[in-house]
Image (tube, helix red, strand yellow):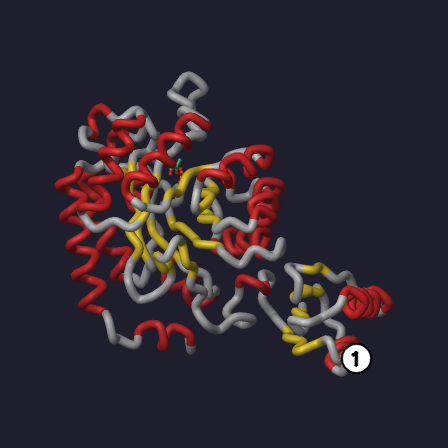
Amino acid sequence: MMVIILNQQVTDAQKKHVLDTVLEAGATPYPAGPTTVVVPGNHAALTEKLASMPSVVQVVPIKSPYPLASREFHPEDTVIDIRGHIIGGQTPTIMAGPCSVESVEGIVEIAQAVKRLGGHLLRGGAFKPRSSPYSFQGHGEEGLKMMAIAREKTGLPIISEVMEPDKVALVAEYVDILQIGARNMQNYPLLREAGKSMKPVMLKRGLSGTVEEWLMSAEYILAQGNPNVILCERGIRTYEKATRNTMDLNAVPVVKHLSHLPIVVDPSHGVGKAAFVRPMARAGIAAGAHGVIVEIHPNPAKALSDADQTIDFAEFGQMVREVNLISDALSGSEKDHVLMHV
Ligand code: PEP
Ligand code: MN
């Protein structure tokens, strides 16, 4: 595999010449944005030929099956700026909100609590993937409008799920980050559309997705030229029935070693029980996650979806304090430096 980096001033004619050269060598070029071309396979002679072209800055050989997502290609951490809030830096990002947006008053009240208690982004489901067709399916576009009002009132950026390729443009009009849910981690047409939208995307790990499959899915988004992908570990399905899912903490350092993309944890879905959300949020940060996303509600028992795993405002406030304490305790440690040289 190789990635060809073209210079910023590349002309259409020069780019066509590069693509034709790849094709003539019997290889297939995949343009990923204006100045990046991925070429699968091993083509030593081609590498030399391309490297001598004036429009080519560099030809990077890559062993990883997900070149653009790999640290091999991009050694530095990716940081993503969401309306001035940085995801992937030293400060942990805290996203919180209800599983489903219920009403405009409700979401505004929750957004105000998220802000007051130290959160950075508001989450909320409008298009909901429910296991039962008879469960509340979310308010759809109306729900997104309610979230936009909450953003206006608090200044918090918003994140919400998109389930269908045809709805990407609509959801992208409202949100600051598109969420791709666990059940859609391998919905390739959806990943492609999310990539084309150029909106930041938070890609949740599938219920039975391996780390490699998850990073390959991220690659689909990156391959469209969209560099703004955030990974979210939300628990995987194991034989263990004491919790809804098993939050795979291993994935945090493993993904940080393999990829430059930011990774957050979702202990709400990861454990599925409110009492265990806060300890697992702490654990995620201790493992090196760049942030947490949790479900909160003023009256969790009344939440229209995922009531069992939803925490109240007091518990959320305590979680934020603890997450920040752990992050501060680790600041200045060289954990990431060591990771990159495993
Ligand atoms: C959610 O965030 O409410 C959700 C449905 O998550 P997941 O896709 O991880 O199940
Ligand atoms: Mn949920």
The residue positioned 36% from the left and 46% from the top of the image is 157
Identify whether 222 is placed above or below 161. Answer: below
The residue depicted at 41 percent of the width and 16 percent of the height is 134
Q: Quadrant of the C terminus?
A: bottom left
Residue 41 in the image: x percent, y percent? Answer: 72, 66
Q: On the rendered structure, is 290 left or right of 228? A: left
| Secondary structure state at the residue bearing disc 1 | helix
Q: Quadrant of the N terminus?
A: bottom right
Relative horizontal placement of residue 206, taking residue 323 as reference (left or right)? right
Comparing 102 with 70, the one in front is: 102
Q: Which residue is mark 1?
A: 49
Q: Residue at x 57, y 52 (%)?
A: 221
Residue 132 rendering spot, x and y as whole percentages: 42, 22
Q: Toward the viewer: 281 or 196?
A: 196
Residue 176 falls left or right of residue 27:
left
**Is residue 5 at all visible to an observer of this figure?**
no
Q: Is residue 154 visible?
A: yes
Judging depth in this view, the residue of 173 and 122 nearest the camera is: 173
Give left or right: position of 337 versus 25: left
